[in-house]
Amino acid sequence: MGRRTDGHLPLEDYAALGEGRSIALSGADGSIDWWCVPNMDSPPLFDRLLDAEQGGCFALTPDAPFTVERAYRRDSNVLETTFTTAQGRARIVESTNSGHAGRLPWAELARRVEGLEGTVRFELTMRPGRRGDTVNPYHSTIGRQTVFHVERVLGLFLHTEGVDHTWADEGVTGHVTVAAGERQVVAIVAGRDEPLVVPGIEEIDARIDVSDKEWRTWADGITYRGADRPGFIRSALALKLLLYSPSGAIAAAATTSLPEKIGGPKNYDYRYAWVRDAGYTIKAFLAAGAQAEAKAAFTWLLEQLRQVGSRVCYTLGGEKVPELRHWELPGYRRSQPVVTGNVATDQVQHGVYGDIFETASCFVESGNILDSASAELLSHLADRCADVWRTPDSGIWELEQAEHYTMSKISCWQALARAVELADGGQLPTTCRERWLRERDRIASWIEAHCWSEEKQAFVMFPGSDRLDASLTLAVRFGFDGVERLEKTLDAIDRELGAGPFHYRYSGADAEEGCFLACSFWMTEARAVMGDQRDARARLDDLTAALDRGVGIYPEMVDPDTGSFLGNLPQGLTHLAHIAALSALDQELRSAEGLPNPFPPSTTEPPV
């Protein structure tokens, strides 16, 4: 841990810091290599993650060979990293701070250096990035403060008196030395197009512990009490980082352009909000007992549907995702392209209908109520789904080739099944209820007639294909079909797409990307829901052990041969799938013990 190759750390060596607006990635060698200011989808202030030689960073690294241990504080997103050298031992405690009243109206990244034994000297570098040579940072004096400028970002480097440093336009260099019992603090306060507050360094230092207390208070409110509570809380805390508090949107991930295969071209910007992720997040927060976060995310989703219409994804502020732009940066381990924007926003994906209605159903099942405006909006969406389900789309995997993807048809079935249930429960108008019911049954019959392969003994990716699709594991959660065909489909996915404890997304994906972690957690969930508790538990244990390479932050993918992390991180969908698997295992255990299931899976089935 903490060793660079060609200037890059392994992705598993990063931990995430956040406060509900921005996320920083802190490396195991003491270098913060990614931080977008002031928002998750803003241009990066530090971008060494994508430009090892010239990128911006905020580094505190021992000036002698070291070993490192690191972990989050219990039930918190405050991080502790302990460095041991031949001369001593010291700990960095770091946080993107919040206050007693919640998120601060500025970005504040604080790093406390504590001496534990002997003496440790850290080399200090605070170097803003140049965004692929499109901006040139500089510093100036305003009043009594030295400030740095990066285009429209204005920032302060604040510190205690024992920090030796020198300013230049490129940033700050120096060193920090601590002996046993000593403490030094360095911090950055920054904003964009706004006046800048200059807090005292003692206030910033104290807010590290305030932030820790606020995280622990939030975690204490999580109602999950299963045997895997620590892992559940860690994933819930990762999702909380990705929840953009100004709007209630949930970012898919905190980064852009981290490769799905080293050297490969599948590099995407995930700092936007996908409808699919919003739906799964709401269910996860409901399972955790985090009603406020679930309501905020659902309200955000409904508002975007009203204002912008049904799209695959939105910006965190609710606008259309910008067009794709390529940046002149080397990329992580020379993997290109480096991009911002995402073409998925203009795709046709029928899965959004199922995601939206599953979200509404989960919200209502938790004892909540839909207002009339939301009910009308959802009714129109159900009508639209009933009209378009026979058309091809890009599918859940956002593929360029439009097909009649089986998972998309199941998602349309799911949407209309949930719409009927909501109408029967008085949550939606019943005017079109019979039409939704008939179209639901037609979709089920179409899937049975066209998407089942006798040769494969599985539902295939699309009619006429012999390819398999691991997302079909979600059909179990959605309550589709009977046990026999779904069990056979799961077995086929294991045989053809499995790689150790992991799974590829679909047939042929192994040539171009790593294994997709959410698929493996979905498989675990599906086995648990179908009653195979022992198999599901074994799968979860194997996955957890294979991913135990960092501090509990999961990426999008892994290399099944080496276990190395791949893709953007923290990846919301992975943590969502982890929570769903834990919830399913806990629910099945509760059922076996005769206890009530607070969040039952959907049970609607098509007619025989």
Image: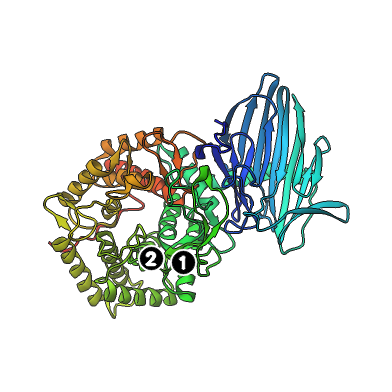
Decide if residue 84 is on the left or right side of residue 595.
right
Q: How many residues crowd mark 1 within 10 Å: few (<14), some (14–19), many (20+)?
A: many
The tag earlier along the polypeptide, 1 or 2, is 1
| Residue 301 numbered mark, or none | 1
Residue situated in front as seen by the camera: 263 or 216 = 263
Q: Secondary structure under badge 2?
A: helix
Whole-Å distance between the Cαs marked 1 and 2? 8 Å
Q: Is residue 591 visible?
A: no
Q: Given the image, on which type of amino acid does mark 1 rest?
A: Leu
Decide if residue 304 is on the left or right side of residue 410.
right
> Which colour scheme appears in the figure?
rainbow
Q: Residue at x 33, y 72 (%)?
A: 426
Counting from the top left corner in percent of width and height, residue 212 is at 63, 43
Q: Residue at x 44, y 66 (%)?
A: 345
Disc 2: which residue = 356
Q: Residue at x 19, y 61 (%)?
A: 463
Contact, mark 1 vs mark 2 (Cβ under 8 Å)? yes
Counting from the top left corner in percent of width and height, residue 102 is at 64, 54
Counting from the top left corner in percent of width and height, residue 447 is at 18, 62
Residue 386 figure quarter: bottom left
Counting from the top left corner in percent of width and height, residue 206 is at 73, 43
From the viewer's perspective, is residue 564 above or below residue 105? above
Residue situated in front as seen by the camera: 322 or 377 = 322
Q: Secondary structure under badge 1?
A: helix
The N terminus sits in image quarter: top right
Residue situated in front as seen by the camera: 325 or 604 = 325
Decide if residue 34 is on the left or right side of residue 559.
right
From the viewer's perspective, is residue 543 above or below residue 297? above
